[in-house]
Amino acid sequence: MHPYQEYIEKLENEYNKTIKDVIYEYYIVRDEGPSVTARELDIPRRAVLHFIYEYNLRPLKHKNIKKKVMTTYNNLRAAQ
């Protein structure tokens, strides 16, 4: 049995999506951190961190951060 099975069942039933899709939605699409994601989903932060590592979402988050930094940098350069 998965260590966070009760949270998996709760969120999958509530959102009608897989747990990976739910965490992806909050952590990547909405660009929330683990603490905010945990608060929004009403589950412990450690569970969110577990899912982030289990589904290897951290590299995606870092890729999005780099993309945002470059976009901001390019916009600032263009405004000069």
Image: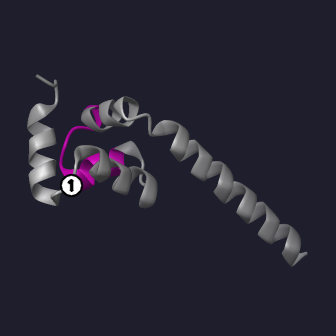
User: Which color scheme did the rendering employ for the protein?
Assistant: one colour
The number of numbered discs placed on residues in the rendered structure image is 1
In which quadrant of the rendered image does the C terminus lie? Answer: bottom right
Q: Position of residue 25 (x, y in %)?
A: 35, 56
In which quadrant of the rendered image does the N terminus lie? Answer: top left
Left or right, residue 20 beside residue 43: right
Which residue is most to the right? 80
Residue indicated by mark 1? 17
Q: Position of residue 9 (x, y in %)?
A: 9, 43
Which residue is most to the bottom? 79
- Residue 31 visible in the shown view: no
In magenta, the rendered stretch is 35-46
Residue at 38% over, 36% down: 52
- Residue 26 visible in the shown view: yes
Residue at 86% over, 74% down: 78
Q: Position of residue 63 (x, y in %)?
A: 61, 46
Instruction: Kindly state the secondary structure of the residue where label 1 is placed.
Output: loop
Is 76 placed above or below 3 here? below
> At label 1, which amino acid type do we have?
Lys
Residue at 61% over, 50% down: 65
